[in-house]
Image (spheres, rainbow, N blue to C red):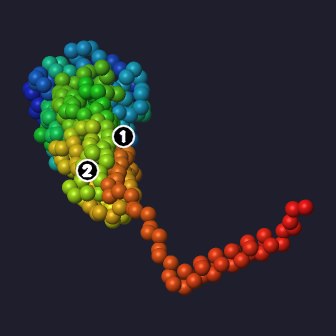
Amino acid sequence: MVSQADPISISGMTRVSPTMTLLALTGLPTAEDPSKYVSFRFTTGNVAGADIVLNHAGYALNNTGFGQQFQIQAALYDVSADTSYTLGGTVNFNQVRSVVNVGTSNQWASYFFVNNQTWPLQAAELKAEQGSLPALKKPVLLAPDHAYELRFYLSQQGAADGRGMIDDISVLMKTVSVQATADGLFSFPAQSGGTTADKVQDNDFINQLPLEADTYTLSLVSADPGLSLNADGSITAVAGQPGTKTLTYELCPKYDTAIVAGFESNACKTAVATVELTGPAFPPSVSISCAPRTLTDSEDQQAVCTITADTVVSSDLSISLTPLASTPRFAGSCTQLSSITIAAGQDSATCLITAVANSTPGDGDVTAVMSIADPEPSTPPIYTVAIRSDTVEIQNDDGVAPPAATPVPSLEEWSTIALTLLLVLLGTVQLRARRPSNRA
């Protein structure tokens, strides 16, 4: 190893950005050598129910050489686990990445291997990114109670010696905590079900801040039958399963697992969403019946027609009717209806058919046909029809009309009758006079 700075420990979640010159580098190798590096050591703490992330790691380099370049490669080394994790760039030797070619002029340049300015920090907390190194934009999850090193592998580009100084090595660690909050009641009609417009994560937080895209993951823990969690955090409830149901989900922070693989978050939290499916599972089935089914056209003759649902309805239910044919033989409320309403909390509604009393003999019997019509098309329909119609017959009770009386002939009619009889008599006499005698 060319040289190594004294280990610098970070207690808890503190940013360290020394202003002193840590290293003056001379006699660097001219080829990549994984055994030659300078390092900056830091340690993590252990916060129950939260994660520790490396949110920022970088350094500044002052190149004082003439006509030379430094090539710098960096890795995150887990001292406790004796494992090296690569940071940014393309793979070089072993797992070392992030090659930076620093120019030959006398200047300071800052380079960041991890520099996430949005997750879950504010941009003002970080230095402006400089240099040509593309920084990782997601935080790296660290193991609690571990010692880590930022290792910088340096090599000299060219034959001549060069000199440089690495300064301002900085590490920013943050704790990440999650708040997953039980959701308010989502409600749907049981007959139709549905998908929530709100998302379960809408009232959840990471580090007391509303969630931002690509900073968290959602997963289903458990759900009552008929509920499912969609990728966007909405809940879908299937139709036909009334009752109050719950769904439990887990919210976890999202890290760059491609850099430090195999670590599991300690900050994940679960919460419960409640969905209420109200009303019956299926549309009510309605029937009609009338009693009595036979009336006479006398006083105080009426029938009650009842439209009945197979369940108590939770809200007013309008049932369409086929209007009765118009006739003077019956009246009542049923004759005026094109629909009838079963009130909320009830399972039936009624109307009346009244026979119109009269004393006209021989006016015959009539039948009133009460029928339920289908509802307006909808999915599902607001009701189905089990028994569609019933009848009420109004019978005549005034007897049969008497036969018509035979009229008395007038004087002229009598004269005609007499003349006719006389002619018949004369014809008979003449007929007898012409017959031959049978006597010898």
Q: State the residue at coordinates (24%, 19%).
A: 78
Q: Which is more N-terminal, label 2 or label 1?
A: 2
**Contact? badges 1 and 2 (CB < 8 Å):** no
Q: State the residue at coordinates (29%, 17%).
A: 83
The one of 101 and 97 positioned closer to us in this rendering = 97
The answer to whether residue 52 is above or below residue 328 is above
The answer to whether residue 201 is above or below residue 365 is above
Give the position of the C terminus as an image quadrant: bottom right
The one of 130 and 142 positioned closer to us in this rendering = 142
Taking the image as drawn, is residue 360 in sight?
yes
Q: Position of residue 434 (x, y in %)?
A: 83, 72
Element carrying mark 2 = strand
- Mark 1 residue type: Ala
Q: Which residue is mark 2?
A: 303
Q: Position of residue 61 (x, y in %)?
A: 26, 38
- Mark 2 residue type: Ala
Q: Position of residue 298 (x, y in %)?
A: 26, 57
Taking the image as drawn, is residue 383 in sight?
no
The answer to which quarter of the image holds residue 207 is top left
The one of 81 and 73 positioned closer to us in this rendering = 81
Residues at marks 1 and 2, CA–CA distance in whole angstroms: 21 Å
The answer to which quarter of the image holds residue 103 is top left
Q: Which residue is mark 1?
A: 386
Q: State the residue at coordinates (20%, 21%).
A: 143
The answer to which quarter of the image holds residue 297 is bottom left
**Residue situated furthest bottom in the rendering:** 412
Q: Position of residue 342 (x, y in %)?
A: 22, 49
Give the position of the N terminus as an image quadrant: top left
Mark 2 burial class by Cα count in 10 Å: few <14, some 14-19, many 20+? many
**Residue situated furthest front in the rendering:** 440
Q: Nearer the viewer, mark 1 or mark 2?
A: 2
